[in-house]
Amino acid sequence: MPYVETMSHPIPFGNYSILANNSYNLVVGANGIVMSTEGNMDLNAFGVSTISSLHGLNLTTSEGNLNIICGNHVHIVGKTVNIQTCNENDQVVVNSNLGIKKNAVVHGSLYVDGEI
């Protein structure tokens, strides 16, 4: 299992900082941007943040957790929305009330502990 340790001391001649007091714009051509690091990466904003893509967006984590935390609402829209675990025998857990506005279709068995 890989291990990443946060460094408290910088390596000499290895830092590069940009300070922009008002705004910072970066425009890149068709070959895109690649950002990679051997350590941790933080992207922080105090205002509204937007990530846009015309053809798709992939968020991938190979060994950790992906946490999406929101103050009010999380809104997911798509032609189809698929939620699944890596192991088909594991459960998808909903830890709150689940409201279904339209039909519920079950392919397989249904176990209910409580009223229907």
Image: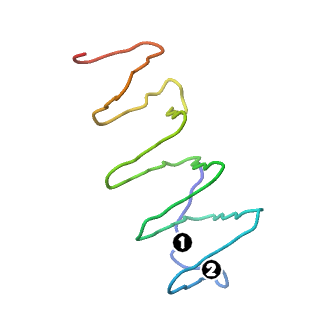
Residue 94 as seen in the image, left or right of residue 44: left
Residue 5: x percent and y percent? 54, 64
Q: Residue at x 66, y 65 (%)?
A: 35
Residue 50: x percent and y percent? 51, 61
Looking at the rendering, which quadrant does residue 3 occupy? bottom right
Residue at the outermost top position = 109
- The coloring applied to the image is rainbow
In the rendered image, the vertical position of residue 24 relative to residue 83, given as above or below:
below
Residue 98 as seen in the image, left or right of residue 3: left
Amino acid at the residue labelled 1:
Met
Amino acid at the residue labelled 2:
Ile
Task: Say which residue label 1 marks.
Answer: 7
Check disc 1: other Cα within 10 Å, few if <14, some if 14-19, many if 20+: few
- Which dot marks residue 49? none
Q: Residue at x 48, y 41 (%)?
A: 77
Q: Nearer the viewer, residue 116 or 67?
A: 116
Q: Nearer the viewer, residue 6 or 19?
A: 19
Q: Nearer the viewer, residue 81 or 10?
A: 81
Numbered disc 1: secondary structure = loop
Q: CA distance from mark 1 to mark 2?
A: 9 Å
In the rendered image, the vertical position of residue 66 relative to residue 100, given as above or below:
below
Check disc 2: other Cα within 10 Å, few if <14, some if 14-19, many if 20+: few
Residue 89: x percent and y percent? 50, 23
- Which dot marks residue 11? 2
- Are the residues at dot 1 and dot 2 in contact (C-beta closer than 8 Å)? yes
Numbered disc 2: secondary structure = loop
Residue 2: x percent and y percent? 60, 52
Q: Nearer the viewer, residue 109 or 103?
A: 103
Quarter that holds the C terminus:
top left
Q: Residue at x 38, y 14 (%)?
A: 110
